[in-house]
Image (spheres, coloured by chain):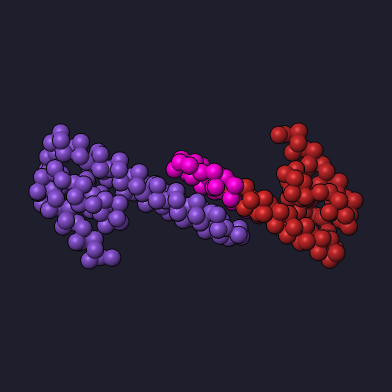
Chain colours: A red, B purple
Amino acid sequence: MVMHDLKWSASEKKIARRVYEAACESMLARLVADFKAKAAAVATPSEMWAIEDHLHQQRRKIDEIFDYRYSQPPLVFARLIGEGHLDEAQLSGLSEEKLEIIRHFLSWMRRGS
Amino acid sequence: MVMHDLKWSASEKKIARRVYEAACESMLARLVADFKAKAAAVATPSEMWAIEDHLHQQRRKIDEIFDYRYSQPPLVFARLIGEGHLDEAQLSGLSEEKLEIIRHFLSWMRRGS
């Protein structure tokens, strides 16, 4: 399973791009909704600072996930599935080899958590 | 006007402490109200990140102002007056020498802005 030797066809690249965009939108939409609900409930400065800290962490997490989208797509897909932002069915069209790598990462991440 | 030679009587220290607490509460209350209004109007992720950035800056600014409360009280009072969180009348009870130093800083800051 040599990751950097994986070849991506034009149609697979298109699937990957579409999936990233949809997952990113889903993550952000969920985060915005969550942020607005939490902000509406804020009553004290410390609750406000807690939201700032949370947003900061989430921003870093999203950046971190997508940082690997060019170098390690299977890892990114596995992480998006693991966090509920992507369903394996959306990856239909990728080669079986890639899907297996993604499942492998996913089960490895789930054992670790 | 040698700042570190200023002597603070017990009653002046009490005034300073009361004024800091009131100003800090005023700044935070204003910030929380502003935050809640802005958060309620958020419609996009970038608007949410802009709020995070703004909160981060405000937090640093507040920390920065109060960092000097022990070493340079007149500077902190001047800044609080300059930003509308403190009225000079609340400093009544401080020596005329200290009030003059505060006014001096305030006019100096206002010339600079």
Indicate left or right for B43 with A52 as reference.
Answer: right
Residue A38, given in percent of the width and then of the height, sits at: 57, 45
Residue A36, given in percent of the width and then of the height, sits at: 58, 50
Residue at 10% in and 52% down: B1
Q: Nearer the viewer, residue A37 or B82?
A: A37
Indicate left or right for B73 with A9 as reference.
Answer: left
Q: Does the rendering let one see residue A95?
A: yes
Residue A7, given in percent of the width and then of the height, sits at: 83, 59
Queried whether the magenta region covers residue A39, the answer comes back as yes
Magenta stretch, residue numbers: A36-64
Q: Nearer the viewer, residue A93 or B13?
A: B13
Q: Main secondary structure of the magenta part?
A: helix
Which image quarter holds the C terminus of chain A? top right
Q: B14 above or below A29?
A: above
Q: Nearer the viewer, residue B73 or A4?
A: B73
Q: Does the rendering let one see residue A57?
A: no
Residue at 40% in and 47% down: B29
Residue at 62% in and 47% down: A34
**Number of marks present in the image shown:** 0
Residue at 22% in and 41% down: B16
Queried whether the magenta region covers residue B18, the answer comes back as no
